[in-house]
Amino acid sequence: MLKMVLQDKRGLIKFLVFIILLLVIAIFIIGAYLFSISKNKNSQNQSQNPSVIENPLNAIIISNTDSQGNVNSDKVVEEGVKEFNLSYINFIVIGLGISKLHKSSLGYGNPMIQVELGDDVWSSEIINSELITKHEGITEPDIKIKLSKEEAVKALLSKDIKQFMKDSVSSERTKVEMIAGKTELFSKGYLDLYDSLAGKVVLDLDSN
């Protein structure tokens, strides 16, 4: 009788240990699954969030900074012009606030900006909250930003791109041309971006 009781207890203990192990494994698997989902969502959000980007001049700035922390700005601009690529355009348009733009609720489509650096033409478009930049022009951009490549690199070198570009526009080193009508621009959220460049609100809806 005692032997049967002991066997029953041992069997119960083994059963309980087995259940606990199953629970631990289940919790581990569920935790790993949830962590994987969270990680994928975060990486997806970062890839679609145009506000997360590193200044492409950083490496050039570091290589042209002496032991006292003095930056050779002329050398940085010279090398930046030679190394100019898509990331430079992205950093500029993001600094100007392209991430705040959105697809028109009035049926005009996605925000599209063309940046012209002499004969070097780039275009940036916001598609489903993602910044898409191409080394080519587009047929009907919303606005055109025209400046020299040197001026673009200096904008990246500045502490405040918005303020630099605003000063550049006011001094006519940079030109901003509205292509789309004012209603279309307003419907895509250009009010703040244009205001930050021109220094005043010009997108009144009295005319298109």
Image (cartoon, helix red, strand yellow):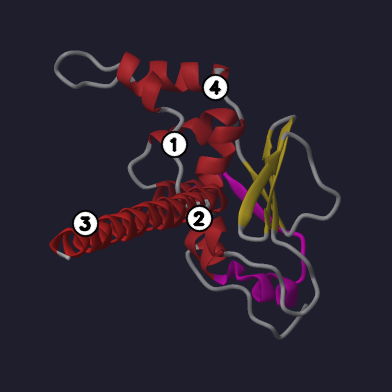
For label 4, the crowd category at 10 Å Cα-Cα, with few meaning under 14, some 14 to 19 and many 20 or more, is some
Which residue is drawn at the image coordinates 52% and 44% (left, top)?
Answer: 92
Q: Which residue is mark 2?
A: 41
Q: CA distance from mark 4 to mark 1?
A: 11 Å
123 is higher (above) or lower (below) than 8:
above
Give residue 85's quadrant in the image.
top right
Type of amino acid under label 1: Leu
| Callout 1 secondary element | helix
| Label 4 residue SS | helix
- Give the residue at mark 1: 156
Q: Secondary structure at mark 2?
A: helix
Vertical position of residue 74 compared to residue 129: above or below = above
Q: Amino acid at mark 3?
A: Arg
Whole-percent x and y of residue 181? 77, 71
User: Which residue is tagged 3?
Assistant: 10
Q: Marks 2/4: CA distance? A: 36 Å
In the picture provided, is 111 more to the left or to the right than 62? right
Q: Reading the chain from its start, which is encountered first: label 1 or label 3?
A: 3
- Picture residue at 60% right of the left edge, 64% below the top: 101
CA gap, disc 4 and disc 3: 78 Å
